[in-house]
Image (cartoon, rainbow, N blue to C red):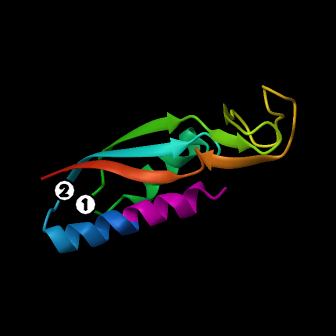
Amino acid sequence: MHELALAEGVIGVITQEAGRQGFTRVRLVRLEIGALAAVEPEALAFCFAAVARGTASEGARLDLVVLPGSGWCLDCGQTIALPRRGEACPLCGGYKIQVTGGDDLTIKELEVD
C-alpha cells in the first residue's frame, strides 16, 4: 500500500507551500492520477484524510481526477490508448509498448485561505 507514502508526500508538498506562500488552510486539493500509476483512489483518499490531521489540509476536499494511459507501440509506430500495463497494442497486437502518459500523480490545484 504505497498510497500512504503518496499521501504523506502530497501533504509534505502542501505544507512546504503553506510555509512559502503563507496560507493557513486548504479547502480543496485536486490531484490528477494516471490510470497506469498503480494508485487505488479510495485508498489514497483514506490515507490523505489520515495524514492531513493537524495540518493546513485537515478537512480539505480531495478531488481525484483519473487520467487515461497512453503509449507508443514500437511494432506499428502508433500512439495508442493504454488502459493497463502489459496489454497488447489494440492496433497490431504487439507487446513492445513504451508508456508515454498516465503514470503520474500531480497536484493540479489547491484552494486555500
Kind of residue at badge 1: Ala
Kind of residue at badge 2: Arg
Is residue 25 shown left or right of residue 41?
left
Is residue 113 shown left or right of residue 19?
left
Helix or strand or loop: what does disc 2 sit on?
A: loop
The stretch in magenta equals 1-11
Q: Is residue 18 above or below residue 109?
A: below
Q: Does the magenta portion include 3?
A: yes
The quadrant of the picture occupied by the N terminus is bottom right
Report how far apart the C-alphas of labels 1 and 2 lie in the structure.
5 Å
Q: For mark 1, what is the residue?
A: 56
In the foreground, 40 or 85 = 85
Helix or strand or loop: what does disc 1 sit on?
A: loop
Label 1, residues with CA under 10 Å away: few <14, some 14-19, many ≥20 = some
Q: Residue at x 38, y 69 (%)?
A: 12
Q: Residue at x 61, y 43 (%)?
A: 40
Q: Position of residue 89 (x, y in %)?
A: 80, 33
Q: Position of residue 45 (x, y in %)?
A: 48, 44
Q: Quadrant of residue 43?
A: top right
Earlier-in-chain disc, 1 versus 2: 2
Q: Position of residue 33 (x, y in %)?
A: 51, 44
Q: For mark 2, what is the residue?
A: 25
Is residue 22 shown left or right of residue 60?
left
Look at the numbered discs 1 and 2 and tell me whether their residues touch, using CB distance below 8 Å: yes
Q: Residue at x 61, y 39 (%)?
A: 35
Q: Does the magenta portion include 74?
A: no
In the foreground, 91 or 27 = 91
Q: Is residue 104 above or below residue 94?
A: below
